[in-house]
Amino acid sequence: MVKRVLFFLILLLALRGVAAGQASAPVRDYFETLCRLSPRPPGSENHRRTRDYLRKELARLGWRVRLHTFTYENPFSGVQEGTNIIAVLPGNEKKTVAFGSHWDTRPVCDRDPDIRKREKNVFGANDGNSSTAVLLALARELASSPPTEHTVTLYFFDAEDSGRDLSTYIIGSSRLVEEEETGDIVFGILVDMIGDRDLALPYEEYSYRAVPGLARRVGDYARDKKGFSFFRKETGPAVWDDHMPFLKKGIPFICLIDFTYPWWHTAGDTPDKCSVENMGRILGLLFDIARSPALFYPGF
């Protein structure tokens, strides 16, 4: 009897390992590609190449892709053209669940403890690459799954991370909400810095204040159904991120972010600090939300 119990425990662990590996595989490919295109501050050749790569890859996967372009004053490099990339997987109904990530990387390592490194570009392994890799992998997984009745939209925001103060951050998402139609979005999830090896995801404060029910349901599901103990049942910092323009417009949108990441805006934000396995776990959660949004937002 004891041997049988041990056998089933080992089998269960093995199956969980396979599932985690399967979820990580598509993320790994995208993460490595994005790291080859890093750093990519606005105006750089890597920035242009990444924009083209995202557009082509999403179209290749069968999503309806369009570009939202805008001109803005970048505090570090002057006037730039920004590009938000919008990918839509239409359902029979217009009601939409949305997901977002910023794809640009920060022009300067202004929080680095070594003053000599502060003018360098942030590599952006976690802050830019991790969340964008997860959204690309989500696009791939959803494109190869049976169609849903509802619509899924992915937003890849530009010009999020070139701010000197609050007025010069989140430019891309702010312009998108001002200039694009968002009326069909029932709710959305923003991911940012979700690739940390020592991942910790409390409720982001602005999200929890605005849509506590959505924040709790996502956190409870991640902890109870997925077994993700890094989802903390506590409120963390308030983060001025790309969900804010949606919240200001009255659209429920929460942010999943690890703001305790010690290499934020430093030269240390490199791939060795990241866990593709954690990115794969976030992919699994977002996939469940995309497929069954009513579990997370009653009345969807």
Image (tube, rainbow, N blue to C red):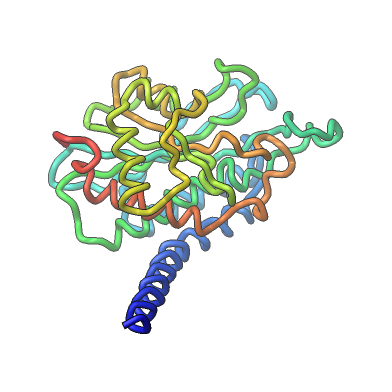
Above or below, 17 relative to 51: below
- Does 202 sit left or right of 65 as displayed? right
Q: Which of 227 and 60 lies nearest the eye of the viewer?
A: 227
Question: Which quadrant is the N terminus positioned in?
Answer: bottom left
The structure residue drawn at horizontal position 31% and vertical position 25%, both measured from the top left corner, is 211
**Quarter of the figure with residue 68:** top left
Q: Relative to 196, is 224 on the left or the right?
A: left
Residue 295: x percent and y percent? 21, 43
Q: Residue at x 46, y 62 (%)?
A: 24
Q: Nearer the viewer, residue 5 or 269?
A: 5
Which residue appears farthest toward the front when viewing the image? 1
Extreme residue toward the right, this view: 116
The percent coordinates of residue 30 (x first, y second) are 51, 58
Q: Position of residue 251 (x, y in %)?
A: 29, 25
State the image quarter where residue 57 is shown.
bottom left
Q: Nearer the viewer, residue 277 or 92?
A: 277
Which of these two is toward me, 105 or 279?
279
In the image, is 47 to the left or to the right of 236? right
Is 293 located above or below residue 159 in the figure? Answer: below
Left or right side of 46 for 295: left
